[in-house]
Amino acid sequence: MHILYFHQHFSTTKGASGTRSYEMAQALLREGHTVTMVCGSKARGQTGLEQPFKRGVRRGQVEEMDIIEFDLGYGNELSFAKRLIVFAKFALRSMGVALREPADVVFATTTPLTAGIPGIFARWLKRKPFVFEVRDLWPELPREMGVIRNPVLLLAMSILEWASYRSADRLIGLSPGIVKGITKLGVSSDRVTMVPNGCDIGLFGNSSNGWRPPSVRDDQLMAVFTGTHGNANGLNAVLDSAAVLRARGRDDVRIVLIGDGAEKTRLMQRAQVEGLDSVVFLDPVPKTELAGLLASADLGLQILRNVPAFYFGTSPNKFFDYIAAGLPVLNNYPGWLAEMIKENNCGYVVPPEDPEAFADALITAAEDRKELDAKGERAQDLATNQFARSTLAREWVDWVCGAARH
């Protein structure tokens, strides 16, 4: 079968961005299918195409994938209005691709929600099977975060959400809350399945190229956060805990924040003003290089703002990278990941907005290395037994291709 795959923020492992779509496309290829990937240009991402754009688009083969990349740059530092413009342009250009390119299945994945528009048109105008993957619930998340307040825009997004779900032959949710959110809108549960982000055991579980930033000693606990430094991530919680560590005179903990985003400059300025020397900022690194950093880390940080929609409505790829690398995880908000950490005793769960408890967990990890190592072993067992990407990818391929067979 030929799968026409729409993901605006696609990247290969050579970029410093999420690689779920790359891994799923590779799984399709291994099963004998062909893939055309339609995407934009994401800051820190890497599609593998290097030739210049012609009339705003370039196309070529990368690792047996046919890639169509639009010259539509996107990054977390863009204003909300500029993001909407980029989303709309990608959706409009993708509609043309969806209507003219051959496909046995049209697949689209969020974010943004507008990613579903080409699938809707292919489904109703070309009668092509359409599978829609939901990574975040929109407009629920931005509404609860207070990012979007305009009632007209929220209504338009709700209509698009409803149309995307109802148009899709099949849907995929990445977390229990996402699946529940889809079915709450009247979609039959037999059209929805959950395939969470998975663990790349081969990449993160066997790295022999461990490294630490020069400012982090081998005898210090190194806790790492990998990902966007944006509004949703709530990284002030990390700096609040660093202030507690400073007040307690703890020099045996270092917190390494790897990534980029709209909040990074402000966070760095705050750390400098307050003398938070335990916090180290790094630029994003490719996944292959990140594996070496995680191999030398002691603890992974799963941090989000205290927004109830996050509790069961997200499936952060960083969590699965951590446990694939055998790292225990410190989580600072309730939900399905917090419950998983508790059930498997593979990390620490602290209440939201409680810097004292956050610092206590870091100190406990630093002082009891034997228990920390045991938690790490249990984390890797969880990764291998429940979230191996190879297993989840096969389930994903069967579900997507099953839309055409059905």
Image (tube, rainbow, N blue to C red):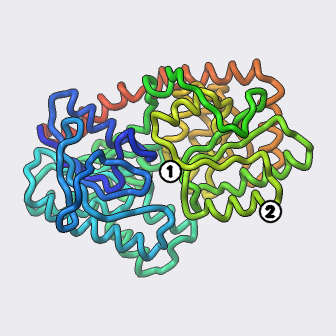
Q: In which quarter of the image is residue 236?
A: bottom right
Image point 19% across, 27% down: which residue? 31
Residue in the picture at 61% in, 63% down = 263
Label 1 residue SS: helix
Q: In the rendering, at what x and y percent does residue 337 appear?
A: 58, 39
Residue that carries the numbered disc 2 in the rendered image = 273
Q: Is residue 120 above or below residue 383?
A: below
State the residue in front, 155 or 226. Answer: 226
Residue at point 81%, 24% (across, down): 368
Query: What residue is pinned by disc 1?
Result: 313
Image position of 195 with respect to 356: above or below: above
* Amino acid, disc 1: Gly
Left/right of residue 162 with respect to residue 30 in the rendered view: right
Q: Earlier in the sequence, mark 1 or mark 2?
A: 2
What numbered label is drawn on residue 129?
none
Apparent side of residue 69 relative to residue 97 in the rendered image (left or right): right
What's the CA distance linking mark 1 and mark 2?
35 Å
Instruction: For mark 2, give the secondary structure.
Output: helix
Establish if 376 lies above or below 4. above
User: Which quarter shows the N terminus?
Assistant: top left
Q: Is residue 198 left or right of residue 98?
A: right
Q: Residues within 10 Å of mark 1 (few under 14, many from 20)?
A: many
Q: Residue 122, percent across and down?
A: 14, 58
